[in-house]
Amino acid sequence: MEEAPVVVIVWNTNENGWITEEHSVAAAIQNICLRAHDLGLGSLWIGDVFYAYEETRQYFGKEWKLSGAVALGYPAAEGRVPKKLRLEEVAEFLS
Ligand SMILES: Cc1cc2nc3c(=O)[nH]c(=O)nc-3n(C[C@H](O)[C@H](O)[C@H](O)COP(=O)(O)O)c2cc1C
């Protein structure tokens, strides 16, 4: 995070009070990463912001839920496609 030229801090305002609002935030983060890729940028989804949860909220003066962060920058190296699990390893089909 210290080295990235841009770090997006992602908040969940939870304005409707729905538990599922966190799903929307996760989808938004995914879209940030996909758009970054489109633009030739590298991105890193960071969930490890929770170790400084209160400090981060205080620093930015926000009452919202801290959801994560996304580091963005031009990649130093070509990315590799990670090994995918087989469909049977991630899904169960009921008949
Ligand atoms: C919800 C979520 C949280 C993540 N949090 C972190 C994190 O805190 N630190 C980290 O190094 N990678 C984290 N990652 C993983 C990276 O964002 C990235 O997916 C991982 O480095 C694999 O990259 P690659 O698939 O391009 O190799 C997280 C991924 C997800 C989906």
Image (cartoon, rainbow, N blue to C red):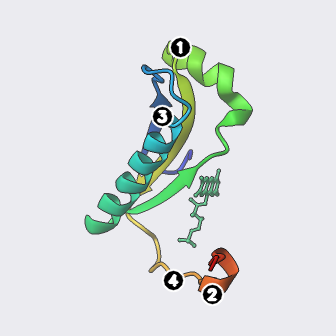
Quick check: marks 1 and 3 in contact, CB under 8 Å?
no
* Separation of marks 2 and 3 at Cα, in angstroms: 30 Å
- SS at mark 3? helix
Q: Position of residue 91 (x, y in %)?
A: 63, 75
Residue 67 against residue 80 in the figure, above or below: above
In the current view of this chain or complex, which residue is farthest to the left?
A: 39
Residue drawn at 35 percent across, 62 percent down: 34
* Residue denoted by label 3: 21
The yes-or-no answer for disc 2 within 8 Å of ligand 1 is no
Relative to 25, residue 62 above or below: above
Find residue 94 and report its horizontal and vertical position in percent.
64, 76
Task: Give the image quadrant in which the ligand numbered 1 is located.
Answer: bottom right
Asked whether mark 3 and ligand 1 are closer than 8 Å, the reply comes as no
How far apart marks 3 and 4 lie (CA) works out to: 30 Å
- Element at label 1: loop
Is residue 39 rendered to the left or right of residue 16? left
> Reading the chain from its start, which is encountered first: label 2 or label 4?
4
Q: Amino acid at mark 2?
A: Arg
Query: Foreground: 33 or 72?
Result: 33
Residue sitting at x 43%, y 21%:
16
Decide which of tag 3 and tag 4 comes sooner along the chain. Answer: 3
Residue type at mark 4 is Val
Closer mark to the observer between disc 2 and disc 4: 2
Q: Which residue is mark 1?
A: 63
How far apart are the alpha carbons under marks 2 and 1? 41 Å
Question: What residue is disc 4 on?
Answer: 81
Q: Earlier in the sequence, mark 2 or mark 3?
A: 3
